[in-house]
Amino acid sequence: MHTAVNPGCEFDLPVGLIGWSQDSIAGTFRDGTDVQASINALRGVTNDQRRAFIATYPLIRVASFEGQGWITLDNRRLFVFRSLLLPTTPITVRLATYEEAQELRRKLTTRDEGATIVIRN
């Protein structure tokens, strides 16, 4: 894992360059909202409206791992973002703190460097 110069700093990354830390996600957010329903509700709006909606979410936390690039701790949010935005669309992210990166390391289940994810029912 790269050593973070400024943990907690915010910066923009193309959404397509951020990988998942786990190989699957739950189909609902913690508040019970269905992940796929959130995506479907935004399919009919413009890209600018999608970006404005995404800006209402908390920033996703990322860490950079050797050979794997940028990986998120916030897999469900990233799934929504990647489902709605072009891969080159920049989103603002927050660099994970050391403690968050250690949490990510414990939860890391991806077998393909964060390239794919499955939604569990």
Image (tube, rainbow, N blue to C red):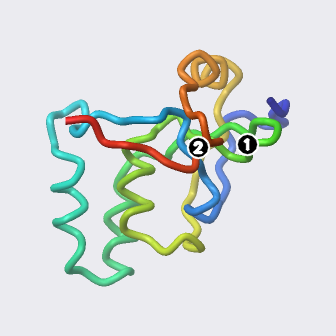
Counting other residues with Cα less than 10 Å from the Cα at mark 2, is it few (<14), some (14-19), or many (20 or more)? many
Direction from residue 48 to residue 20 in the image, left or right: right
Residue wearing tag 2 = 114
Mark 1: amino acid: Gln
Counting other residues with Cα less than 10 Å from the Cα at mark 1, is it few (<14), some (14-19), or many (20 or more)? some
- In the image, residue 64 sits, relative to residue 45, either above or below, namely above
Direction from residue 10 to residue 55 in the image, left or right: left
Residue 62 quadrant: top right
Q: Where is the N terminus found, in terms of image quarters? A: top right
Kindly give the residue lying farthest to the front in the view shown.
Answer: 111
- In the image, residue 112 sits, relative to residue 53, either above or below, namely above
The image position of residue 80, as x and y in percent, is: 35, 55
Q: Are marks 2 and 1 in contact (CB under 8 Å)?
A: yes
Q: Nearer the viewer, residue 5 or 74?
A: 74
- In the image, residue 45 sits, relative to residue 69, either above or below, namely below
The image position of residue 44, as x and y in percent, is: 20, 80
Residue wearing tag 1 = 68
Residue shown at 41% from the left, 59% from the top: 81
- In the image, residue 42 sits, relative to residue 74, either above or below, namely below
Residue shown at 84% from the left, 36% from the top: 5
Find numbered disc 2 in the image and state the secondary structure of the residue it sits on.
Answer: loop
Residue shown at 28% from the left, 34% from the top: 26
Residue 13 quadrant: bottom right
Q: Nearer the viewer, residue 63 or 93?
A: 63
Find numbered disc 1 in the image and state the secondary structure of the residue it sits on.
Answer: loop
